[in-house]
Image (cartoon, rainbow, N blue to C red):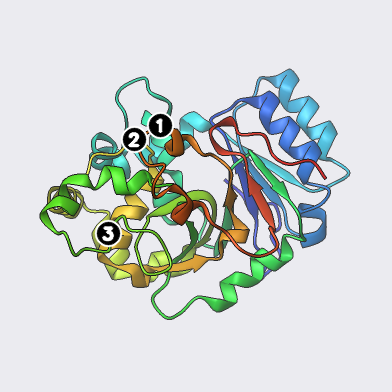
Amino acid sequence: MGTGGLERGCVPFLGLDPCRAHVTGAWLRSSSRETASQSGCPSLVFCSPKRKQKKKLNHVTQMIVPVMFHDVDVLTEQLFPVVEAMQKHFSAGSGAYYSDSIFFLSVAMHRIMPTEVERIIQLDLDLKYETNIRELFEEFDHFLQGAVIGIAREMQPVYRHTFWQFRRENPQTKVGEPPPDGLPGFNSGVMLLDLEAMRQSQLYNQLLEPDMVRQLTEKYHFKGHLGDQDFFTMIGMEHPELFHVLDCTWNRQLCSWWREHGYSDVFDQYFRCEGQVRIYHGNCNTPIPED
């Protein structure tokens, strides 16, 4: 798994999808020219396309940015020993969309990437960029001591719902409450992973241990279904110092499913986002505004 001649200080970014090659190709066409070429950094696409699809992707990107292909099956094999224990707590069940190990890639990225890769930006594919992504790279400079991951808050009352039992037992808790004072959880659509900090953080690596995962899921009565996002949300309730919170404009989520499913009275407290949007996130297949 080579780095393809990474320049020192260069931050690669990746488009993550467990090999819907046609989607990956669309992402490369729509966003690489505005993002990767501006950053001057290579893009990592985690995909195991058929030969014909891979040739097509190479053709699309050869004039834009170097692309490195990684086999999903190989990555999953490397990830599984690390994330096996947490999958039962943060997956909907066998065969469900978020049940594969690949949806926990960010959790253990620091253990499977070459050590010369020190930082990575992980991006969902359902994004639209309204600014130069170099500005997102600069968020790494604002990490406080001890922070290992940059991530934005979840913009729906997802975790108000998930933590219902803990909230009932702890009526004064901020867990699941809306911003600015509450802890609404995280959304993993846009993430900055300081891999070197993750490698060096004794606390973070302790939290990956099966016993720690079990203790925290029991404490918070946590059963999720959103993969890495659930894990980061749960440990963020316990150790917020591990996270640099991105402004909502870096991951302006558009999904409003929970407005119509029991939380209309509080929905806008979570969904509100002031400021010029820099990245739109069309989560749960929500249309993204046209220019």
First along the sequence among labels 1 and 2: 1
Identity, as a three-letter code, of the amino acid under mark 2: His
Label 1, label 2: how many angstroms apart (C-alpha)?
A: 7 Å
Snapshot quadrant of residue 286: top right
Q: Which mark is residue 175?
A: 3
For discs 1 and 2, the disc positioned in front in the rendered view: 2
Figure disc tally:
3
Q: Give above or below for 158 relative to 54.
A: below
Label 1, label 3: how many angstroms apart (C-alpha)?
A: 23 Å
Residue assigned mark 1: 98
First along the sequence among labels 2 and 3: 3
First along the sequence among labels 1 and 3: 1
Instruction: Give 71 or 215, whichever is nearer the viewer.
Output: 215
Labels 1 and 2 touching (C-beta < 8 A): yes
For discs 2 and 3, the disc positioned in front in the rendered view: 3
Residue assigned mark 2: 225
For discs 1 and 3, the disc positioned in front in the rendered view: 3
